[in-house]
Image (tube, rainbow, N blue to C red):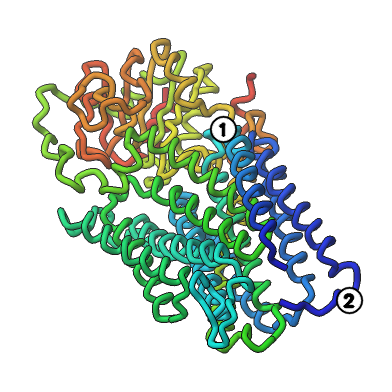
Amino acid sequence: MTAPPPATFLQAPAFIDVLYIVAFSLFIQGLRGLSGPRTAVRGNRIAAVGMAIAVVATLLHPGEHRWGLIALGIALGVAVGVPAARQVKMTAMPQMVALFNGVGGGAVALISWVEFRRLGSTYGGLTVVSPGGISLHAALPTYIAIFSVFAAIVGSISFWGSNIAFGKLQEVIPGRPISFGAGQMAVNLVLGVLTLAAGIDLVAGAHSELVFIGMLVCAALLGNALVLPIGGADMPVVISLLNAFTGLSAAATGVALDNPALIVAGMIVGASGSILTNLMAQAMNRSIPAIVAGGFGGGGAVAGAEGAGEHAGTVRSTSAADAAIQLAYASHVVIVPGYGMAVAQAQHAVRELAGELEERGVDVKYAIHPVAGRMPGHMNVLLAEADVPYDQLEEMDDINPEFPRTDVSLVIGANDVTNPAAKNTPSSPIYGMPILEVDQSRSVIVIKRSMNPGFAGIENELYYDPKTAMLFGDAKSAVAEIVTELDSL
Amino acid sequence: MIVASTLTSNLAILVLAGFIGFVVISKVPNTLHTPLMSGTNAIHGIVLLGGLLLLALPEIAPFKLDALSEALLVIAIAFGTINIVGGFLVTDRMLEMFKSRPAPRARERGSEGDEE
């Protein structure tokens, strides 16, 4: 490739490379800022500045820029991305991340496709000999094709997988597992083999664009086939996994295009995605292969919701007035918020309740399970939105030893993460899952709409505990009622 | 220019970046995992650069971009931009909400909860 000579030092390759190095240093520095809420805002902005520098550096590359097309693409992206980011509800964050991740993967796949179209007969080249007998692989090393094909496959899987994940979380498509049943593994295997075969064919020097498109389509189908059978509850793990995938595919594109900023950024995302995926899988007591093989209720191996109502114990229900008295005379209260609270938009009411109790001298803390909400750390964001100070939120490992000293645990819209069966019942599908040990506290109040089982479809033993009182109703109005009752005390 | 040593140095960068990623990300507390996910998500939008590079290549005979290629690149750039701009903005929005206990301006009520 012969680029025109640089016009100024700004276009010198060394200068551009230095800008890339500055850019990825800023990414790393920015992510270091995320080690605490105090420095996080600045960290994110530092990373954004790094991104701006990387973009400018790229535009400085000498060449014949199609400025109109570049501006068009960026304008389209800004027109869609900015309003989406401004307007999205905090409860819908997992979907948003899925969508942003999907378009990232889509961009990778499209860029690889254009690489293929552009390079044509020099793509791959293990066996390529041009009609004149001149071997072409000197012009373009095979590894570029390998990385490019890898990026195309993974990007395509990520794009389609993320879109399905978005659809499930947004409830555009049903959250329950959709699969071919027993044949699912076979279907995935066939699609995987076809994708790989097409990829190898391309790297070996097949110049048919049809093969490339076929590969993209197979990878797309594979992305669908992989994510459709996974239940809505496991979706965050899937998004995180796909996030890691997109990162790796970006890194691969970086190797193919010889761009260090892309490589570093892609690998960091890959690392972050892998760590989060692992963490989430642990917190949900699920292995990653099991999730990918099909979610709760997917394979029929996991006990479903049939246990509802068959429990031997009795349930004690309480009133808002009694709950208010119980809370007002407690000295230590722990609030256990779950996604149900967020769905009911009860965060502000809960914060008001906590404030009211604190004015009465009650010590109030929030217990946050690592996967409370719909993705790790989601509950922290939702409570932060409701102005709950972050240092009042306790992580699971810090709060669990405190439950025995807690007078009242107030469980609002959380279910499976409080189920003692995870510790006591080896036959339970959630056995071994780390839980908030609410059952250790002196008394428990559970605000819940009905006795319906939670996301995992498992009966919660906590509700039958003699020291548990159930306050049935919508989280928001129930909490508001407690506040009213507190005021009249 | 692509020479054999570019591959090795790029692979070195790849591996080292992976290790750095693990170290840096491991230090992020659970509290910030959602912003972390959306923030790193924004970072992989950097594939946008690939699209920009391809749209800047000189029009030399075998490497010419046809209309379809150009259209695909515009979409790719739009996708990458959505990923970057949306990702960073939404992360900023989330992080801005994290306030510590002595809330400087509690919005609805008085200054409860600052006994510590």
Whole-Å distance between the Cαs marked 2 and 1?
47 Å
Residue A260: % across, % down: 69, 56
| Residue at point 84%, 70% (across, down) | A11
Task: Sort mark 2 into few (<14), some (14-19) or many (20+) by Cα contacts within 10 Å.
Answer: few
* Residue type for callout 2: Ala
Tell me which chain the residue with mark 1 is part of: B
Residue A280: % across, % down: 42, 38
**Residue A102 in the image: above or below residue B15:** below
Q: Secondary structure at mark 1?
A: loop
**Residue A262 in the image: above or below residue A417:** below
Query: How many circles with numbers are drawn on the protein?
Result: 2
Q: Nearer the viewer, residue A422 or A59?
A: A59
Relative horizontal placement of residue A166, taking residue A61 as reference (left or right): left
Disc 2 target residue? A7
Q: Nearer the viewer, mark 2 or mark 1?
A: 2
User: What residue occupies the far top of the structure in this picture?
Assistant: A405
**Residue A351 in the image: above or below residue A98:** above
Q: Nearer the viewer, residue A241 or A191?
A: A191
| Residue at point 37%, 67% (across, down) | A220
Q: Is residue A324 visible?
A: no
Quadrant in the picture for the C terminus of chain A: top left
Q: Residue B83, located in which quarter of the rendered image?
A: bottom right
Q: Is residue A301 visible?
A: yes
Quadrant in the picture for the N terminus of chain A: bottom right
| Residue at point 31%, 18% (across, down) | A439
* Residue type for callout 1: Pro
Tell me which chain the residue with mark 2 is part of: A
Residue B65: % across, % down: 61, 85
| Label number found at residue B29 | 1
| Residue at point 58%, 77% (across, down) | A135
Q: Nearer the viewer, residue A230 or A209?
A: A209
